[in-house]
Amino acid sequence: MRDLGRMQDWPELQALGLLVALSSHAQSIGQAAETLGLAQPNASRSLRNLERELKVPLLRRSPRGTSLTVEGQAVAEWGAKVIDAYDHLNAGTRAIQDARAGTVRVAASLTVAEYLLPGYLTTFTSTHPEVDVGLAVENSSAVIAAVRQQRCDLGLIESVSLPEGFPAEVVGRDRLMIAAAPGFGAGWSEPITAEALAEIPLLVRELGSGTREVLDAALEEFGGASVAGEYESNSALKVAAATALAPVVLSELALRDDFRARRLVPLPVADDLDLDRELHAVWSPRRRLSAGAKSLLEHMVSGHG
């Protein structure tokens, strides 16, 4: 039977790792510390504590460096088995996590969260009832920040630019449209060019949103958009546009119901005004996707085609 009552007297795993490094390749405590990502003073202190706890001479120190005593070599060999067992423990728990899938944390930009993701989640959860999906709604720049900081498994964005070095997949396509109240829109019969649109005061999303980035990129040659009002909410923008305050630029997805109800009408645009965009899922290259996150990603990629 295992004596678990003396676990408080067991050697520290980190100190054992230093011994293993010294027994295999490290020529000094500094090199062993670098292998474990430790500062040398902390590594030296950890090894001194280990010698004191075990009451065994582990290290032979000389001007040429540090080596293990015969006793230290034996402890290092036993310690390597402990570290291998701990590796097996970690690998096993990760496998269990992947098998269970668990909660997939998604951060999505506003338009994607409101108009695209609900359909995906409805069909996904019906076939993957074991996977819980947690959702945070931000603008695209905040979603990218969450991906960088690994606060989510998947980020869904509308931006033209993608974070450099991050894997990404297209999960949808969309285009921006210019919409206005019916009375306001009746005066626009000719297609609006990019140059003309840059001179029209517009209701737009805030800086940092994917919608704003696409608009500014399309009008960059002519100095960007002229702003009549800036809102962080698609709904607020549509209400303002319906009062004939100014035309609004939003996703076709966000405007679809307003066009059907004739609260807003689309304004014609010229061929030189490119407002098409791809919607992407992005994730951290430093983070392995869980089984649940992979399944959700594959579902969205296959669903948009």
Image (tube, rainbow, N blue to C red):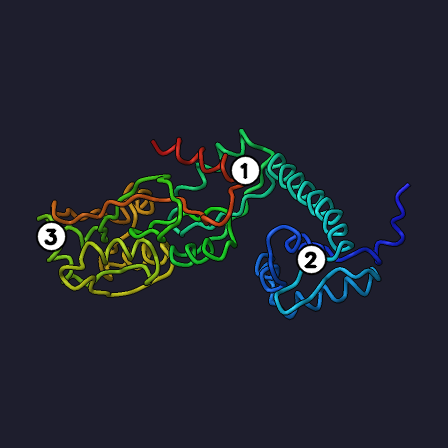
Query: Which is more toward the observer, 156 or 290?
Result: 290
Q: CA distance from mark 1 to mark 2?
A: 33 Å
* Res. 193 mark: 3
Viewer-nearest of discs 2 and 3: 2
Tell me which numbered mark, 2 or 3, is placed earlier along the sequence. 2
Tag 3: amino acid: Thr
In the picture of the structure, the residue carrying the numbered disc 1 is 292
Tell me if label 1 and label 3 are in contact, CB under 8 Å: no
Residue 30: x and y, percent? Answer: 59, 64
Q: Mark 1: which amino acid? A: Gly
Tag nearer the camera, 1 or 3 = 1
Pointers 2 and 3 in contact (CB under 8 A)?
A: no
Identify the residue at image location x=34%, y=39%.
172
Which residue was labeled with disc 2? 14
Residue type beneath disc 2: Gln
Residue 196, picture quadrant: bottom left
